[in-house]
Image (tube, helix red, strand yellow):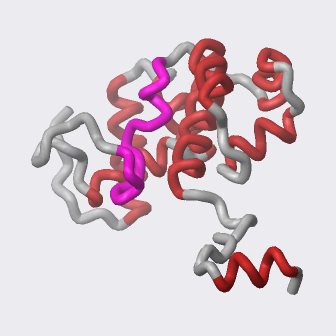
């Protein structure tokens, strides 16, 4: 152990896992990824527009590297969203205050929808489903997915 490590340990300021990503950084990165994917933009193209490599964009999206204020501003401009977009639905207890009043926030049970839509499968499924114009076909797909999931919810009459 080096003298600096020993001094930091003695002061009670132990280094907090330099390889562990902060939950807010992970959340902001996932929102960057979500918006980039919604736009159909590659990491390489986003990096080019920001003067970064795609590897740096990957690190931002994973939350491994923190995104500074000026970079976040640039990301918002390139991705066409307000800066607040990146903090929407930030993890509770993260120190980031939600703009919603108590009682109006999304419940934990409902966050699975956001999590799913943030995934590659969820995004691809959503994009493909929206392109289906026939309401009967759309209803059949919903019914099929429910039956595959063995969902006991009553079927709506859309």
| Extent of the magenta region | 82-96
Q: Is residue 112 visible?
A: no
Q: Is residue 86 magenta?
A: yes
Residue under the point 65% across and 33% down: 68
Name the quarter where the C terminus is drawn: top left
Residue under the point 77% across and 84% down: 6
27 relative position to 5: left or right:
left
116 relative position to 103: left or right:
right
102 relative position to 87: left or right:
left
Query: x, y percentage for residue 110?
Result: 29, 52
Residue under the point 81% across and 74% down: 4
Query: x, y percentage for residue 8?
Result: 70, 76
Main SS class of the magenta portion in the image: loop
Residue 97 vs 18, above or below: the answer is: above
Q: Which residue is at the front of the view, 4 or 17?
A: 4
Query: x, y percentage for residue 127?
Result: 54, 29
Q: Is residue 149 visible?
A: yes
The quadrant holding residue 61 is top right
Query: x, y percentage for residue 95?
Result: 38, 52
92 relative position to 129: left or right:
left
Tell me how many marks there are: 0
Q: Which residue is at the front of the view, 156 or 115?
A: 115
Name the quarter where the N terminus is drawn: bottom right
> In the orientation shown, which residue stands out farthest toward the left?
103
Residue 58 vs 75, above or below: the answer is: below
Q: Which residue is at the front of the view, 50 or 31?
A: 50
Q: Which residue is at the front of the view, 42 or 82?
A: 82
Residue under the point 62% across and 44% down: 120
Q: Is residue 104 magenta?
A: no
């Amino acid at each position: 152990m080096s003298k600096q490590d020993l001094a930091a340990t003695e002061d009670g300021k132990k280094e907090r896992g330099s390889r562990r990503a902060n939950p807010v950084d992970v959340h902001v990165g996932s929102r960057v990824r979500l918006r980039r994917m919604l736009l159909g933009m590659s990491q390489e193209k986003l990096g080019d527009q920001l003067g970064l490599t795609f590897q740096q964009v990957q690190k931002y999206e994973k939350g491994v590297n923190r995104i500074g204020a000026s970079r976040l501003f640039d990301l918002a401009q390139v991705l066409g969203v307000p800066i607040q977009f990146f903090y929407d639905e930030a993890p509770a207890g993260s120190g980031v205050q939600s703009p919603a009043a108590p009682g109006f926030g999304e419940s934990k049970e409902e966050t699975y929808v956001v999590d799913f839509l943030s995934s590659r499968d969820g995004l691809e499924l959503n994009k493909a489903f929206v392109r289906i114009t026939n309401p009967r076909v759309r209803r059949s797909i919903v019914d099929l997915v429910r039956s595959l999931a063995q969902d006991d919810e009553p079927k709506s009459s859309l």
